[in-house]
Image (tube, rainbow, N blue to C red):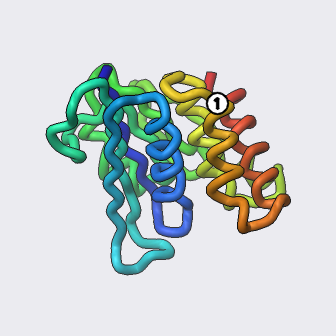
Amino acid sequence: MLERILIAGSGGQGIVLVGRLLATVAVETIQHVTFFPSYGAEVRGGASSCQVVLSGREIASPLTEEPDSLILMNQQSFDRFIGNAGKDSLVIVNASLCTPPPGRSCVCVPATDLARSQGSDRVANFIMLGAYVSRRRLVAPSAVREGIRHLLHDKGADVVDANIQAFNCGMEHGS
């Protein structure tokens, strides 16, 4: 088993947070996991991405030129990284902020619109993570929910609940 995931968006969208969560949860059931964040100096609004590699064998490099899955949160990230997608790559795009060209096979999830309807566009990242988990099923959804509880416990119960609700929403929209 080998799954190479690229998550990209702009600073402030929680790209690194969901990548770190995915890697942390995967460590419990997948033998080899790497997490490699990358963000610009601007932090908010600048480019942000991370790569997560899940493997049953040792991982030679935490970076890949052709991800198996791409989670793209905005148009700038789509334009920058879509050329790295292979013909069989799973490409999940935030359709609220990104319009893939005709003919490009993508899973379009209106994550920002869905997040706003839930009260905060800050949870769009967890909607996208839910869409990914529903498609790939490499980690248990219950483990992700528990990971959210653990990762965000110091933010308060309302924040934890909102992010779990967003993750569940993404699970429904991703399948």
How crowded pointer 1 is (Cα within 10 Å; few <14, some 14-19, many 20+) is rated as some
Q: Nearer the viewer, residue 130 or 105?
A: 130
What residue type is disc 1 on? Answer: Pro
Q: Which residue is mark 1?
A: 141
Residue 3 visible in this rendered orientation of the protein: yes
Instruction: Judge whether 140 appears above or below 74 on screen.
Output: above
Q: Nearer the viewer, residue 118 or 113?
A: 118
Q: What x and y, as percent, mark residue 88?
A: 32, 20
- Occupied quadrant, residue 114: top right
Instruction: Judge whether 117 appears above or below 167 on screen.
Output: below
The extreme left residue here reads 60
Q: How many marks?
A: 1
- Relative to 11, is 39 on the left or the right? left
- Relative to 52, is 132 on the left or the right? right
* Residue at 37% over, 38% down: 5
Q: Quadrant of the C terminus?
A: top right
Q: What x and y, as percent, mark residue 43?
A: 44, 76
- Relative to 108, is 32 on the left or the right? left
Instruction: Judge whether 126 appears above or below 53 on screen.
Output: below
- Occupied quadrant, residue 166: top right
The extreme bottom residue here reads 42
* Residue at 38% over, 33% down: 69
* Residue at 19% over, 41% down: 65
Dot 1: element: helix
Q: Quadrant of the N terminus?
A: top left
Q: What x and y, as percent, mark residue 8?
A: 42, 52
* Residue at 53% over, 32% down: 132
Q: What x and y, as percent, mark residue 94?
A: 56, 44
Residue 104 visible in this rendered orientation of the protein: no
